[in-house]
Image (spheres, coloured by chain):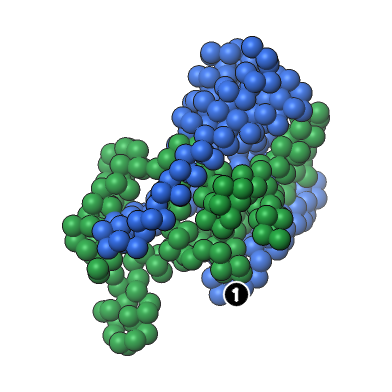
């Protein structure tokens, strides 16, 4: 039953995605591989839309994935799944707040969890790299190293990286500019 | 107004004005919940925020639930979570329903190819920021790099890595503190 499965998958993500919203990324990537509900390219599009619309990115990702898989109800169920564990946990912890935040054990566990979460996000970032700046299919077909790289995309990425360092503008603006550049220079090759 | 409804609507506003990750929610929480409503003090929000970092789930959502719970007990917490999520649900549903009609057009495909390059840069930049905050010594560096390599090269469920890293952190820090004592 797809709704139950959706709830269960996002329930797990709600527990194990430690930190900010992008921590959901490695889990969603895994979900795309294990279920085939959406492709990596779909996932990259979801990130773009989640970053440029209101709402915390983790919730947006859940809503989007749920909708993509099972429509309006899927959207609601995925979102409930991701917020459910946090709600239960916070309500419990709120009862003994002081004790919890000063617990040595909790701090020691999180000393290991935080870099782990960063490592996982790096791996998810690497997959996005392979579909955004590289063209592995062309490389496999032609065997020439030069065809491995999407040169236009790489130039755009480098420019965007420095632009974001120089001007702290809203991510949606950079996404919109990249869309226009993609259309003008036919990044998709169509 | 009914207090529960008030919580739901206030946190819906917070959700609607948050863009990006959980960190961007803090200034909006301050404005809506501390200044406009006076439900909690600024110092409390910061406390909730730091505890949220050592709890599962997303930091911004956790903080919202803490505040809702403080205002009106556990159902206050539940309504805060639902309130934050509500605008996302509506907005994303509309976009997702709309976009599937256009995805096959060459124009849209070219646009998304450009957008993907930008998304990679956004991820890279947030990785750099997170890396600076979490990778603080050689031990955390080793955890980060080995989990990166393992997840690129193998097909193991990331949940296992998270559990293992938590245990390793606990064992390592315990051992260190016994050593010192």
The colour chain A appears in is green
Split into 4 quadrants, where in the image is the C terminus of chain A?
bottom left
Split into 4 quadrants, where in the image is the N terminus of chain A?
bottom right
Query: In the displayed structure, would residue B26 be above or below residue B94?
Result: above
Residue drawn at x 56%, y 58% is A69
Q: Nearer the viewer, residue A85 or B136?
A: A85
Q: Label 1's element?
A: loop
Left-right relation of B126 to A160: right
The quarter holding residue A79 reads top right
Q: Which residue is mark 1?
A: B154
Residue drawn at x 45%, y 36% is A54
Chain letter for mark 1? B
Query: In the displayed structure, would residue A152 be above or below residue A96?
Result: below
Q: How many marks?
A: 1
Residue drawn at x 48%, y 31% is B16
The colour chain B appears in is blue
Observer able to see residue A183: yes
Residue drawn at x 23%, y 57% is A183
Q: Nearer the viewer, residue A171 or B172?
A: A171
The quarter holding residue A76 reads top right
x, y (%) of residue B42?
Answer: 58, 19
x, y (%) of residue B132?
Answer: 49, 48
x, y (%) of residue A124?
Answer: 51, 61
Observer able to see residue B44: no
Query: In the displayed structure, would residue B172 be above or below residue B56?
Result: below
x, y (%) of residue B1?
Answer: 64, 12
Left-right relation of A100 to B120: right
Left-right relation of A68 to B108: right
């Amino acid at each position: 039953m797809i709704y139950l499965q959706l709830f269960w998958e996002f329930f797990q993500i709600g527990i194990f995605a430690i930190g900010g919203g992008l921590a959901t990324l490695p889990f969603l990537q895994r979900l795309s591989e294990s279920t085939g509900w959406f492709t990596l390219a779909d996932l990259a599009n979801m990130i773009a839309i989640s970053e440029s619309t209101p709402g915390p990115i983790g919730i947006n990702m859940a809503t989007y994935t749920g909708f993509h898989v099972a429509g309006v109800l899927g959207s609601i169920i995925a979102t409930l799944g991701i917020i459910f564990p946090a709600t239960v946990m916070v309500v419990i912890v709120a009862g003994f707040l002081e004790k919890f935040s000063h617990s040595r054990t909790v701090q020691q566990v999180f000393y290991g969890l935080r870099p782990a979460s960063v490592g996982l996000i790096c791996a998810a970032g690497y997959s996005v790299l392979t579909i955004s700046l590289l063209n592995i299919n062309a490389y496999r077909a032609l065997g020439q190293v030069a065809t491995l790289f999407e040169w236009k995309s790489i130039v755009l990425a480098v420019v965007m990286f420095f632009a974001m360092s120089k001007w702290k503008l809203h991510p949606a603006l950079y996404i919109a500019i990249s869309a226009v550049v993609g259309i003008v220079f036919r990044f998709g090759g169509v | 107004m009914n207090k529960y409804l008030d919580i739901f609507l206030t946190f819906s506003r917070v959700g609607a004005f948050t863009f990006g990750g959980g960190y961007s929610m803090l200034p909006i929480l301050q404005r809506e919940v501390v200044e406009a409503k006076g439900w909690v003090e600024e110092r409390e929000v910061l406390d909730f925020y730091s505890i949220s970092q050592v709890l599962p789930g997303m930091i911004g959502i956790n903080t919202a639930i803490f505040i809702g719970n403080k205002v009106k007990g556990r159902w206050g917490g539940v309504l805060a979570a639902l309130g934050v999520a509500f605008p996302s649900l509506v907005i994303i549903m509309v976009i997702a329903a709309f976009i599937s009609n256009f995805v096959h057009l060459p124009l849209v495909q070219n646009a998304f190819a450009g957008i993907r390059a930008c998304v990679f840069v956004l991820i890279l930049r947030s990785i750099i920021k997170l890396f600076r905050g979490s990778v603080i010594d050689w031990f955390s560096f080793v955890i980060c790099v080995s989990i990166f390599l393992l997840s690129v090269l193998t097909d193991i469920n990331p949940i296992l890595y998270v559990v293992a890293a938590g245990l390793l952190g606990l064992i390592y820090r315990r051992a260190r503190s016994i050593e010192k004592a």
